[in-house]
Amino acid sequence: MEDILAVYSRPCDPEQPLVCMDETSKQLVKETRSTVVAQPGIPVRYDYEYERNGVSNLFMFYEPFGGKRYVSITDRRTKVDWALQIKELLGNHYPNARKVVLVMDNLNTHTGASLYEAFPPHEARRLLDRLEIHYTPKHGSWLNIAEIELRVITGQCLNRRIPDKQVLEREVAQWQNQRNFLQAKVDWRFSTDYTRIKLKRLYPTLST
């Protein structure tokens, strides 16, 4: 826990940007009946029935103190899917960064080994050398600031019926562009000193 908080307290460094990564899924559903459009004095009306149309995965890469986020939609969330997202992050979004400081939870797909499953050894090593990975502790995924941004996208974009992947990609891209234009950031105030007081029960008790 203190390792993550120490990373968050570092001064901003363009050569080593901090990026938080997390994932979520979205159930795609189609309407079975036409929506009744709103009229004066009558709100829009939807039928409660719907047709399931699969599930898409969302990868969220969020630079919390730079106000940038990059969201990708995939059909799956395998090791190879994660590895491809990492290559996209390093090659397209941060090509000039010496290292990317990456904070994420400790899923079995989020490891250097996944890069070796997706790419030849020399390419996997090259990508891994450009990462400084920090894992949130078990039961401590709330320390990942990307979770906050996932809650934002859920409330602003995903909290409705979306029929297919194409519509999802379009809506998420519009949301992402707007948030990046506004440079929406997180005001993170949870510090190590505060943690040692507020979460004192989590620390071992030393006998004297």
Image (tube, helix red, strand yellow):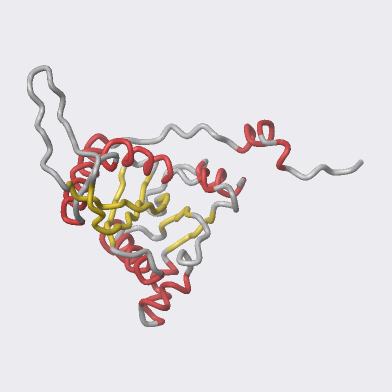
Q: Does 126 sit above or below residue 85?
A: below
Looking at the picture, how far across and down is residue 59, in whole percent?
34, 55
Picture quarter containing residue 131?
Answer: bottom left
The answer to which of 104 and 123 lies nearer the viewer is 104
Of all residues, the one furthest to the top in this rendering is 41
Residue appearing at x 16%, y 24% in the figure: 43
Residue appearing at x 23%, y 47% in the figure: 50
Residue appearing at x 30%, y 57% in the figure: 55
The answer to which of 160 and 4 lies nearer the viewer is 160
Residue appearing at x 69%, y 31% in the figure: 197
Left of 178 or right of it: where is 1?
right
Left of 113 or right of it: where is 42?
left
Q: Does 6 sit above or below residue 101?
A: above
Left of 167 or right of it: where is 195?
right
Looking at the picture, how far across and down is residue 160, in whole percent?
25, 40
Looking at the picture, how far across and down is residue 172, in whole percent?
23, 47
Looking at the picture, how far across and down is residue 96, in whole percent?
31, 59
| Quadrant of the rendering where the C terminus is positioned | top right
Q: How many marks?
A: 0
Of all residues, the one furthest to the right in this rendering is 208
